[in-house]
Amino acid sequence: MQIALLLFARFTALDVVGPYEILSRLPDAETVFVAEAAGPVRNDDGTLALTADRALADVTHPDIVVVPGGPGQSAQMENEALFGWLRAVDTTSTWTTSVCTGSLLLAGAGLLAGRRATSHWLALDELRQYGAEPTGERVVTDGKYVTSAGVSSGIDMALTLTGRIAGDEHARTVQLATEYDPQPPYDAGAPHKAPARLVELLRSRSRFTVR
C-alpha cells in the first residue's frame, strides 16, 4: 500500500508528520514524500526541511494521498502541475485526504465539488468558492475523501483512516503505541471555546497564518 505525502514550499510540518506517524504503521505501508521536484522542501518558517523522495511525475498510482496545508498553500492555487497530478492520482487512489488548508488544494483541483469537507477554521469559507460544502467538524469523510481541520487534526484523520483500512483493533493499537491521549493544558483549541479576543486576533492576522 503506497502512501504519498505531498510537500510544497512553506507547508506546515505537523500536517505531514502527524499523519505520517500514524499511517506508516498500516500493514504493508510504503510511505513516500513527493513534491514537484525531488529534494529538500522547507516548512512554513524555513527552519525545517523534509526530503521529497520523488517528483510528482514519479508517483502515479498511490493508494492514499495526503495533502497538507500551510501558508504556502496560497501560492499553489494556480499551480496546474500540482492540480494535474492531484486529478490524475485521484482517478486510481483508494483514499484522497487532506489536513488543514490542504483541502483548498483538493477543492481547487475540482475534487471536492458537491462534497462535505473541512479545513482550518480560518479557511472554511474559502471552500465554498470551489463548490464544496464546508463543515466545522474535525474530520469529515465523504466517499473516499477524508478532510481534517487545522494542523493537529491530521492525527485524528489518520487514525480514522487506519480504522477504516485495518480495523478498529489495529487503530487502537496504533493509538496506544503512539500514546495519543490528548490532555491539553488549555481549552482554547477551537474558535467556539477560545476567548473572543484570541479569535479576533487570529482573524486580523495575515491570511491563514497563526505565526
Image: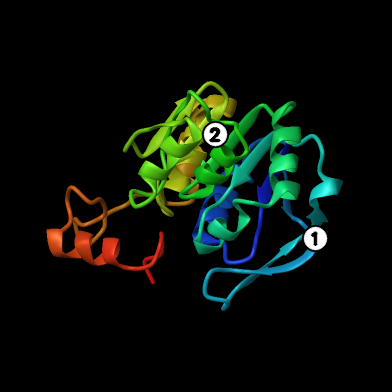
**Left of 186 or right of it: where is 57?**
right
Rounded to the nearest whole Å, what is the CA distance between mark 1 and mark 2?
Answer: 29 Å
Q: Residue at x 74, y 53 (%)?
A: 34
Estimate the x, y position of residue 149 in percent, counting from the top left: 40, 45
Mark sitting earlier along the chain (1/2): 1
Is 60 located above or below residue 205 in the figure? Answer: above
**Is 136 or 132 nearer to us in this picture?**
132
Q: Residue at x 45, y 38 (%)?
A: 129
**Is 69 or 51 nearer to us in this picture?**
69
SS of the residue under disc 2: helix
For the C terminus, the quadrant is bottom left
Q: Which residue is mark 2?
A: 162
Q: Give the foreground label among 1 and 2.
A: 1
Q: Residue furthest bottom?
A: 47
**Is 108 or 32 nearer to us in this picture?**
108
Does residue 1 appear in this view? no
For the N terminus, the quadrant is top right
Q: Residue at x 66, y 57 (%)?
A: 7
Estimate the x, y position of residue 210 in percent, counting from the top left: 36, 66
Q: Which residue is mark 1?
A: 37
Does residue 34 appear in this view? yes
Estimate the x, y position of residue 69 in percent, counting from the top left: 52, 54
SS of the residue under disc 1: loop
Type of amino acid under label 1: Ala
